[in-house]
Image (cartoon, rainbow, N blue to C red):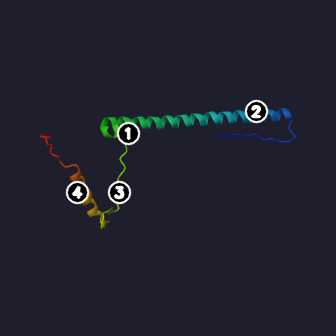
Amino acid sequence: MEIRVNLDENEMAEITQEKIETIQEYQKMIYKVRKLENKVIHRQKIENYIKRRYNNFASNTKKMVDSILQRNKEPIEFRNIKKVNQIITEPTEIKNKIKKHFEKWTKHNSVNMEE
C-alpha cells in the first residue's frame, strides 16, 4: 500500500487537518491489519498444538500421558563414585557399579512367615 501525504507550511489549516485525519485513518487500518495478522498466526499455533496432541493421542499415548501429568525424565549423569578408600571415574566402571547397586537394592527378599 502506498501512502502519500505532503504537508507544506503554506497550505491552509483546513487542508492540513484533512491530511492529518487521512494519516490517522491509515494508522487505524495498519493497526487493524496487524492485529488480524497476529490473530491468524496465534490461531495457526493453536492448530499446530492441537494436531500434535492428536497425533500423540493416536500414535504415542505414553508421550501424551507424560505431557498431561507433566512428567519429565531428566537424564542422570554420574561423573564419579566416591567410596571410603577410592574414587571411580571410569564411565564403564561407574555403570557397572550402579547396575550392581540397583540389582542388590531391588533383589527379591523372601518373607519369613514364622515370625
Query: In whole angstroms, how far apart are the C-alphas of marks 3 and 4?
Result: 17 Å
Q: Nearer the viewer, residue 77 or 53?
A: 77
- Decide: is 85 above or below 57: below
Residue, far left: 114
Task: For label 3, count other residues whose C-alpha is less than 10 Å away and answer few (under 14), some (14-19) or many (20+).
Answer: few
Q: Which residue is mark 1?
A: 67
- Residue 84 vertical placement versus 27 (above, below): below
In front of the other: 55 or 7: 55
Q: Position of residue 33 (x, y in %)?
A: 61, 35
How far apart are labels 1 and 3 at the CA level? Answer: 23 Å
Q: Position of residue 87 (x, y in %)?
A: 32, 66
Estimate how packed mark 4 is, as few (under 14), some (14 to 19) or many (20 or more) residues with alpha carbons within 10 Å. Answer: few
Q: Nearer the viewer, mark 3 or mark 2?
A: 3
Q: Nearer the viewer, residue 114 or 4?
A: 114
* Pointer 2 residue: 21
Q: Amino acid at mark 1?
A: Ser
Please say if 43 is above or below 96.
Answer: above
Label for residue 77? 3
Of circles 4 and 2, the one toward us is 4
Q: Which residue is mark 4?
A: 100
